Amino acid sequence: MNSSVKQAMADLPLHPFSPFAIELPTYVANTLSAPVLVSIFAAGCAVVFLVTYGIVQRTRPTMSGGDLAVALWFALCGCIHLFFEGYFSYNAFDMASKTDIFGQLWKEYALSDSRYMSQDAFTVCMETVTAVLWGPMSFACVYFIIADHPLRHPFQLIISLGQLYGDILYYAICTFQEVVFDVVYCRPERFYFWAYYFLCNFFWIVIPLWLIWQSASETARAFAKVKAASAGKKTQ
Amino acid sequence: MNSSVKQAMADLPLHPFSPFAIELPTYVANTLSAPVLVSIFAAGCAVVFLVTYGIVQRTRPTMSGGDLAVALWFALCGCIHLFFEGYFSYNAFDMASKTDIFGQLWKEYALSDSRYMSQDAFTVCMETVTAVLWGPMSFACVYFIIADHPLRHPFQLIISLGQLYGDILYYAICTFQEVVFDVVYCRPERFYFWAYYFLCNFFWIVIPLWLIWQSASETARAFAKVKAASAGKKTQ
């Protein structure tokens, strides 16, 4: 190998993200393996579920299984949006150098979507809205569910639609870039595409769709009852 | 001027959009002037308002002024989303060559935002969601308002949040591209920035915010009434 080829290879940006041509001069490799990182994330989710379950059992032990599941979901969403996605939003311009737990988790995830490393405009803006709006509102929604508050369904509807729309645009823009401009943000191994990019985000398609349906139906039922009651009064 | 400079200038893409370096080989100049195009658009809005007003007067003449205003708004949104933005979504890959009314209107607007000419991934995806989902849902909402249907507020909330979130991302991404990457999609004249880019989209910030507030309050009030009625029954 001659020296100019060696030099050219030494100048290549050494990072594992796709497309390999993106330049990440501050990139630092992860020290934790993928199974360790995924286990830490799962353990974090389990802690959030357990703490929320404990709070619900103390404050409203009669809560239905369905409402409990929705409260657990929004507690998890609140933590992920505010802390994990908030971390990304705050550090968006220097993600590739981060080596703390959240930094390593984002670098592992970015193997399936390098937009998290490259200050992609849509990703930063969407994640910032998610962290700043849907994060705190998710915690408020947990409180509204526990308190059986009249604002529960407006909040559930707003957060869920925000998550769903953000996720639809997230998938759509990534697909558009690949189909139209031949830009692929995911590494070639299919594992990253299906396990990280597709599966991790698909939860925020299916569950919000279900919660939007539930909130819209419950709200329509409440308005129908109010209308029936007011019609009943008029005919009395 | 030597021949190579002449040749380089002749090869420049001749279009009025910013950044001037974007290549639009199929660009055809508008034949209608800006005042004519704006007048046609305003006349179209007036026709939508008049037809909707006529329908409301025939079907529910007792409707309150507030509900009438919201019905007129959603009728206009339905037409703009489904037909005007639907036109963009359908023709996104060949907007620069379009010379019909909608094509000329979009080319006039794109003087303030060239993403509508350049197959920008976010713009195409967001406009497609707007046309396909918020368009038809806006017409359904007009019907729900006229019919005093229990689904009016869920629909009003969903459409308004969709419009608001899309618009926030629209402004945010454009600002991000300018601040971070120094890419300016608006022509240098301040008129285009303020009259087209800022003002035309600002309606979809202020009005949806107000309608989200209204729907969330009305919904909370309905749930509070249902809860109070059920508590009243239990104590009887």
Image (cartoon, coloured by chain):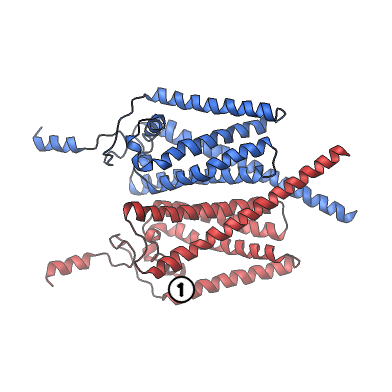
Chain colours: A red, B blue
What residue type is disc 1 on? Leu
**What chain is tagged by disc 1?**
A
Where does the N terminus of chain A fall, quadrant-wise? bottom left
Residue B18: image x %, image y %? 32, 38
B3 horizontally vs B111: left or right:
left
Between residue A206 and residue B7, name the one nearer to us.
A206
Task: Please say if B91 is above or below A161.
Answer: above
Compared to residue B57, the image places residue A9 above or below, namely below
Q: Residue at x 45, y 23 (%)?
A: B39
Residue behind mark 1? A37
Left or right relative to A125: residue B24: left
**Percent x, y for residue B121?**
39, 48
Q: Residue at x 16, y 38 (%)?
A: B8
The residue closer to the viewer here, A43 or B117, is B117
Give the side of residue A148 with respect to residue B99, left or right.
right
Is B30 located above or below residue B153 in the figure? above
Residue A45's place in the image compared with B4, above or below, is: below
